[in-house]
Image (cartoon, rainbow, N blue to C red):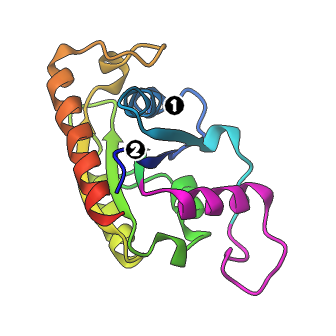
Amino acid sequence: MTDKLNILVVEGTAREGRKSIRPARYVTRKLSERGHEAELFDLGERDVPMLKHTRYSDNDKHPEDIEVFGQKVEEADGLVIVSPEYNHSMPGSLKNLLDHLFPEYDGKAFSFVTVSGGGFGGVRALSHLHDVALEFGAYVGPDIPVSNVGSTFNEDSELKDENYEDRFESFLDDVEEHTRKFS
């Protein structure tokens, strides 16, 4: 086992004006600074069609960004899913992306960052993400709910709220430990 991990950070929405991209970029940068190969898969920069055929189906024509996502998941030691809460759940765009794959997730370490503009930090989305990851056969790991995401991170994805500094450091420690355990 090497100390360097390959971690895929997934930004779970393409919505204009989204603030969840800020902690997604932050986590990706912090994992890279810790010496890991961390990459951001940003739904805002991808063309992910509505699910018609899964990547694992017998259809040999998979959309390019789904094939890229599948390869990145296969190569990753673990995933960090970053998701806002929409209507008491994860965004439909994230669920759609995740549903394109299935066997690729089996035995993968999953960690979660959920966000909200208010005080609950996306905990209801987190509950649904846990359920989905368990169905995939993934190993559900650490999470960090981020409340008031617009005032917690600035537009440059820098942490503004010092109350979260220790929480994020602990979260990243836990992500490393959890990912190593299952990689």
Q: Amino acid at mark 2?
A: Lys
| 63 in relation to 171, above or below | below
Taking 47 as reference, is 1 left or right?
left
Of the numbered discs in the image, which one, if any, rests on residue 18?
1
Q: Are marks 1 and 2 in contact (CB under 8 Å)?
A: no
Work out which quarter of the rendered image holds the C terminus and state it. bottom left
On the question of residue 125 being in view, the answer is no
On the question of residue 2 being in view, the answer is yes
- Residue 7 position within the rendered picture, expressed as x and y whole percent measured from the top left: 45, 48
Residue in front for this viewpoint, 26 or 51: 26
Graded by Cα atoms within 10 Å as few (under 14), some (14 to 19) or many (20 or more), the crowding at tag 1 reads: some
User: For the residue labelled by badge 2, is the local secondary structure a helix, a strand or a loop?
Assistant: loop
Q: Residue shown at 25%/31% (left/top)?
A: 147
Quarter holding residue 51:
bottom right
- Residue 46 position within the rendered picture, expressed as x and y whole percent measured from the top left: 70, 45
Of the numbered discs in the image, which one, if any, rests on residue 74?
none
Q: Decide whether residue 88 is among the magenta residues.
A: no
Look at discs 1 and 2 and give the one toward the viewer: 2
Number of numbered labels in the structure image: 2
Quarter holding residue 101:
bottom right
Give the CA separation, mark 1 to mark 2: 30 Å
Q: Decide whether residue 69 is among the magenta residues.
A: yes
Graded by Cα atoms within 10 Å as few (under 14), some (14 to 19) or many (20 or more), the crowding at tag 2 reads: some
Q: Earlier in the sequence, mark 1 or mark 2?
A: 2
- Residue 75 position within the rendered picture, expressed as x and y whole percent measured from the top left: 55, 59
Which range is magenta? 51-78
Q: Which residue is mark 2?
A: 4
